[in-house]
Amino acid sequence: MSGSYYLVSEEQHNALVRAAYSHRGFDGSEAEAAARFSAYAARHGIRTHNAIKALHLDHLFGSGAGGCVPGAKIEKRAGRFGAVEVWNANRKLGQATAYAALDAAIALADRYGVGIVCVDNAFHYLWGGGYVMDAAQRGYIAYTNCTAALAEVVPFGGKTPKLGTNPHSWGFPTQDAVGFPIVVDWATSVVAMGRVQQFAREGKSLPPNAAVDREGNPTTDPNAAVALLPFGAHKGYGLSLINELTAAYTGGSIPTIRSRWDQRPEEKHTPCFYFQVIHPEAMSSGDFAMGRNQKENVEAVIRDILKDGNSNCILPGQIEAEAAKQSDRCGGLLFTDAEIDAFNAIARECGQPEWNKHALSRAE
Amino acid sequence: MSGSYYLVSEEQHNALVRAAYSHRGFDGSEAEAAARFSAYAARHGIRTHNAIKALHLDHLFGSGAGGCVPGAKIEKRAGRFGAVEVWNANRKLGQATAYAALDAAIALADRYGVGIVCVDNAFHYLWGGGYVMDAAQRGYIAYTNCTAALAEVVPFGGKTPKLGTNPHSWGFPTQDAVGFPIVVDWATSVVAMGRVQQFAREGKSLPPNAAVDREGNPTTDPNAAVALLPFGAHKGYGLSLINELTAAYTGGSIPTIRSRWDQRPEEKHTPCFYFQVIHPEAMSSGDFAMGRNQKENVEAVIRDILKDGNSNCILPGQIEAEAAKQSDRCGGLLFTDAEIDAFNAIARECGQPEWNKHALSRAE
């Protein structure tokens, strides 16, 4: 009964998450998608975007605020282009929408080599890396971006937050080559606003050029920080702008009123998703050096990068893969003491039995 | 006869560049593509990737070294996927290959909504931003990446250069909204190796975390720098890895022997290109707030980002657009004194008349 984490079975976790979503009015398939995705996040050690965060976001911006509509039906816009679909999610739960969009993009990629699904009137899909990781584990090269719920990031050279933290996520089916999919996945701000709040609580300084104060000047004081800066100066700014433009071409409106349902009711307040899947066979010249096949060629490239003093380099997605291995070794999902408390608050909200810490196994 | 720049007409410039490429054995359409693209770069103020650089690269890595084959014919691999083509460029001139691949990706996007052309056995295409800018000016959303000629960049957490400077370039057809296409375009290293050499000449220090010394430790001394670091730590590393993986799925081999034609003759030494074009109509939900159309919606988003203290922010592609305006105002291409000398060296190489500085107009 020692160890840093409590072990919760996926069944136990999913039953509670389903109940919590059902209690908020979501239908069975939505609750199932939410449970499945948050279990996937927890299994991969994603502590910032697990069920606790998902339900908190739903409360702040989702079914608790008008940004998400339980039981909403997705409408697919008929277009003249075969390999690209545009969906109106009608504010359906993000995880259910994202899983469906990913499946549709995969079906398009099977047929055309590449498939794109643009989603308008979306609601937060939690963790973009999870969808492209899932696609990669199914053998596809996948990419997603979305517009974040709030405009918290100051454009490079500016003073006022006008961009979302706007993440990008790429997944590659490298599991046969290196044991896990390579997943490049991050926000375009240096840090998240949650990290600023954590640093304020802990009395720590922010890294330089991560945040600005009320006057728009860079600050390392988390208590003075009111907005974030993009990583890599103009480069991260450009990457964040890509999400805003992609969304704007699809149907998203001005960033500063996103999720602000109390402002300008005549406007659109929803984020957008962009999903893209490529069938690896479609990209293959069939001509790989040294008689290698495609998989062996990808492996040779990765192995070369990690040679000659680079063996300590971590491949993107490796930390998540190691967390998943640890979860599987332990036989369930690993949560901290504070996380179990948060789950028990969720249980009380939806009238489910709390998890008894004394009855749960512990693990390192 | 004053001003910082010499004015050279596009006709005069193109005649010399065509002659230089013809002299090196390239055919008429290759020489024309090279001239057209380097004029486009010069017109947009791209001093680092104009005809001088193109011919220098061709000498170092191209027709002068085995990496580029004048008159090579592109072979298109027949595949079962409609929206993705894979080409074997057989080391054809990069500019001619890239223009053709862009045209093909546009034709696919017209039909399927999205089109991808992966190019194996490519040779340096000079400036990725130029191709996506061209596509954007024709009304399309475009993206390209490639593997850079040499492995000069150390993976995050490593010691040894194993990645190219591997640029990414995105173009959006925003000219109707803001007067020019937004073009997000940069290498994944903090600085280019050319910049390190320039700083060494000028006795300046490098920015922190831009380069490493022989032991793999970060240095700001340009004379001690032997390799580069990715921008944004693990984020730029991930972005650079994307190009290596994309190339590896297509047919590119291990990064460290790229362009090293003297090493391991049984291996592949060529970079790869990836081109992707999306038809903006294919992405549209048709549902834009406040009765806006797609173009007006994109404009509203950009205008919002640049409001409220952000009017000094520069949109990606704006500097290049202003340079193009200046070139057009002056009625030609603007080159420095040192650049005219370099062009005259090119003229001597291919037996063409030199440009007479006294006869050229000057401009600011």
Image (tube, coloured by chain):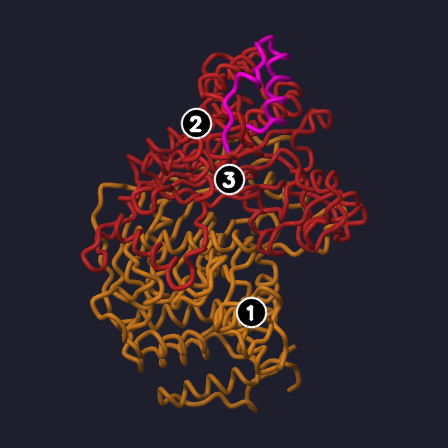
Chain colours: A red, B orange
Q: Chain of mark 2?
A: A
Q: Position of residue B77 (x, y in %)?
A: 22, 52
Q: Amino acid at mark 3?
A: Asn
Percent position of residue B186, x then y: 52, 60
Does A358 appear in magenta?
yes
Residue at (42, 56) in percent of width and height = B145
Would you say A240 lies left or right of B120 here?
A: right
The residue positioned farthest toward the right in the image shown: A215
Q: Amino acid at mark 2?
A: Tyr
Q: Chain of mark 3?
A: A
**Residue B345, located in which quarter of the rendered image?**
bottom left
Q: Are marks 2 and 1 in contact (CB under 8 Å)?
A: no
The residue at 48%/37% (across/down) is A274
Q: Which residue matches tag 1?
A: B45
Give residue A99's mark: 2
Q: In x, y percent, where is residue B316?
A: 59, 56
SS label for mark 3: strand
